[in-house]
Amino acid sequence: MQFRFRTAIPATVIAVGLGPAFAAVAAADEAPAAPGGGPAVIACQQFAQALDYAATNYSDFADSVAFGDARLDFADPTVRSNNTVGRTALRQAAGVALDAAGTPGLQPQIADPMRSWSLHATKLLLLMGVRSGSERIDNAAAQVNTDTHDVQMACAQAGTSA
């Protein structure tokens, strides 16, 4: 579940062969913010905060996925706790991303991938909630990764960063 966040999470998650996992990848150099904080700047900053929050709080569950079997042991108290924390963070981040997408005056090229990110993050947290296996969770996270990249590119093209 490789997740492209603005902040870095230890690369050990990637190094263990996690495949698509929620390991953060540092973003390219941040573009300077547009003067006056237009809709793109406001929305992209809000989205970046959601990404940071989700990455920070999902990382322990990503470790559980990385080091677990195809069927995660949700009876394990650590996995169960990490699942709850990760789902809560994803739910909150999905709401913030959706709010960011609704910023008045925001171009559809930026808003649409933010909405998609919110939808796919919600799908991921639902799969976590019904205790799906590692492969389904990995696949859902891959969708979130694609959306993350799309938002970051759209924000960069608008002269800001996410």
Image (cartoon, grey):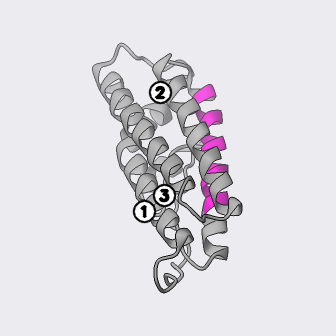
Q: Residue at x 63, y 56 (%)?
A: 111
Task: Report the Cα–Cα distance between label 1 and label 3.
Answer: 13 Å
Which of the 4 image quadrants contains residue 49? bottom left
Q: Nearer the viewer, mark 2 or mark 1?
A: 1
Nearest to the observer: residue 39 or residue 81: 39
Residue closer to the observer: 117 or 138: 117
Whichever of callouts 1 and 3 sits on the residue coming sooner in the sequence is 1
- Residue shown at 66% from the left, 66% from the top: 154
* SS at badge 3: helix
Task: Between label 1 and label 3, give the one nearer the viewer.
Answer: 3
Task: Estimate the x, y position of residue 138 in percent, counting from the top left.
Answer: 60, 35
Give neighbour class at mark 1: few <14, some 14-19, many 20+ (Cα, 10 Å): some
What kind of residue is marked 3? Phe
Which circle's residue, 3 or 2, is located before the other in the chain?
Answer: 3
x 60%, y 46%: residue? 117
Which x, y percent locates residue 115? 61, 47
Query: Contact, CB < 8 Å: mark 2 with mark 1?
Result: no
Pointer 2 residue? 68
Q: Residue furthest right?
A: 109
Could you tell me which residue is drawn at 58 percent across and 30 percent down?
A: 123
Q: Amino acid at mark 2?
A: Gly
Q: Secondary structure at mark 2?
A: loop
Kindly give the residue lying farthest to the front in the view shown: 104
| Amino acid type, label 1 | Thr
Reading the chain from its start, which is encountered first: label 2 or label 1? 1
- Let me know if residue 83 is in the magenta part: no
Residue bearing mark 1: 7
Magenta residues, as a range?
136-151
Q: Which residue is mark 3?
A: 47
Label 1 SS: loop
Give the CA separation, mark 3 to mark 2. 30 Å
